[in-house]
Amino acid sequence: MISVLKFGGSSVASATGMSRVLDIVEKEQGKVVLISSAISGCTDAFLKGDDASIAAMETRHRDIVTRLFTGDERLALQQRVEAIFNELKQAPKDEQVTFGELLSTTILAAKLKTEGRRTAWLDSRDLVVRDDEPATFGKIKTALDTIEADIYVAPGFICRDKDGKICTLGRGGSDYTAALYAAAINADKLQIWTDVPGIMTANPKQVSAARTIPRMSYAAALDMASHGAKVLYAPTVAPAMAAGIDIEIRNTFAPDGKFTVIGAEKDPVKWIGVASEGGNIRLAGAETPSETEDVERASKALAEAGIAAKSIVARGRGLDIEVRPGVLDKALRALHRAFFQQLPVTDVNLFIAGNGAVGKALTGLIARTAETVRERTGKRLHIVGLADSTHYGIDPGGHPELKCEGDYIAAILQQAPKGALFVDVTDSETLYKRYPELLEAGIGIVSSNRRSFAVPYADYAAIRSAARENGAVLRYETTVGAALPMLESITRGTNSCDEILSIEAVVSCTLNQILGDYRPGGGSFASLVRKAQAAGLTEEDPRMDLSGKDALRKLLILAREAGAQLEEKDVCITPIVPPEHFKGSLDQFYAALEADEAELARQEHEAASQGFRRRFVAWLEKTPEGYRAGIGIRNVPPVHPAYHLRGTENAIIVRSAFHPYPLVIQGPGEGARDAASSILNDILR
Ligand code: ASP
Ligand code: MG
């Protein structure tokens, strides 16, 4: 086992820093090659080369020695440091910059020796040949094979060119030195220790929300490093990649904290990070970006921050963006917000049954709202299954076509991933029988089909318990009052042990419209029913509405939500016209209704003369003997919440033990668009 650990200038900037570095090295198993930069500020000072700068550096190094060593060792090392500075002052101007790494590594190696470690100092000037990796590898390998030690300490940055002249690998070059050593000896580990927690999604000095990238590919690291990410010197990547060695970027100041591993694996995310140089921003990604969508997204993010980009171009696996240098930080923050501060996205697979008005409204709505939904909820919806009454299609790619005949549910059970949702937007009377199978397979159900929940109580209870036992979603808010949160208004109470004392629900859009429009002397009641039917306001057979059958389904659902184990037979329905009217054909029904006009007009007059309005109300009441329920016309006074309903509006009035006044919900209760939005909300909840 052999590891190469490189420490940057800020890691070795002081005696405390150096001690911290040696603590980290101490913990390594097996042999270690320790590469170090010059102490921070040193390279700049030597480049400047004036007497004052050099003198200041001499003082800092002497201070470190004084703090780290005692007695004879301190004395010996002070002499050594003095000798190196003398040599520096004699050296050619362009070689002075190479002395920083000599100083830092001399001190580190001496300290390791005094601690009793078998230490060897390696002179990188004799081992690293600039622009000649094969020669470099050979020299390093030979050195390590022939020199016996447990810890090798070597200066980063410095080397010779092919002519043997002392030189450097370029600013920040110590990282590259480390990679050369690691590749030469095929190290098991290559760690670059710096002063930030790995490579981050942005420079944390510019973007405070930047976060550590836990894993990234060599290509992505190279992209970030060669476009201004200072945390890693770009040439470091190639030798590590060729040797197949992972590069870890770690934080000396939080050794157990977050860090980055750069390796051969593919990037797990689409966008890697954002780096910058001058006014040039690089948005590094893991795949070829789209010239339209991705460019647009970046431009929108900048526009929202009031910045007009000079240019945005897709290049390689990312975007090149140019802005005025004056707005750079603001631009980086805006891009970071748009590309890296989003909620993690969860994919939700939908199998929709029903391709009528509501089904079409739903698929349209999902397509239109995809972006907003993803941003607001972190959910990405995929319609992978679709069916009408005869055909179905399933496509994991999200474009199902109605081509298959046969058992849609069986196909779903075979193919659906756990956590998928079955969305019932049909009017089927029998589909509910398949709900338990789906729920038992862990497939959730969102339904707007009220027929499924107005079934015999035992069947209803079986569906509910299948959902509960299997931890599967079961939501059907749309079944009553379309987009109005009627069921929720009841379950919120029952869940918190409030007791529902009564419910009055005005939930027949058809009858609300007709009763509201009815003015005896104007069009007959029957003509208003015909008009409603033509407008698509009624169930397919308008008698469903007028007989109270549709209201009955809604009442059963509401009552069961309130905890009443109500069956159809428990509900006393008084239809608006005598029950015999409903027995024959539809034509006979209309004829009977016309014949009733005089009586209907009389009832309307009577109510109006007393200041009442007529409403078709489904009600539930708690009595000492249990729940009672009924459906029929009520004459409501102006103080009643249902008095003011307009058009097809619905209302629910819930009285409960906790509250002296009722909860009233009123609003639009019908329409494919409302139903679709309510289903979408159930899907997203
Ligand atoms: N000391 C050199 C510099 O400051 C090399 C390095 O730190 O990587 O550029
Ligand atoms: Mg560096």
Image (tube, helix red, strand yellow):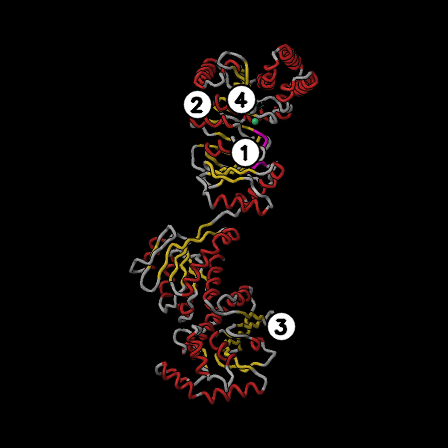
Residue 456 placement, left or right of 67? left
Please tell me in which quarter of the rendered image ligand 1 is found.
Answer: top right
Q: Position of residue 512 (x, y in %)?
A: 50, 76
Which label sits in the foreground, 1 or 4?
1
Classify the position of the N terminus by image quarter: top left
Name the residue nearer the viewer: 475 or 399. Answer: 399
The residue segment tinted magenta is 194-203
Kindly indicate whether the residue at mark 4 contacts the one at mark 2 (C-beta within 8 angstroms).
no
Q: Is 448 above or below relative to 346?
A: below
Secondary element at image label 2: loop
Q: Please name the residue that numbered disc 3 is placed on.
A: 660
For the residues labelled 4 and 3, the Cα–Cα distance comes to: 76 Å
On residue 34, which mark appears?
Answer: 4
Instruction: Relative to 346, say whether 28 is above or below.
Output: above
Element on which disc 3 rests: loop
SS for dot 4? strand
Judging by the rendered image, the residue that carries numbered circle 1 is 198
Q: Which residue is mark 2?
A: 186
Q: Is residue 477 visible?
A: no
Which residue type carries mark 3?
Pro
Circle 3 residues within 10 Å: few <14, some 14–19, many ≥20: few
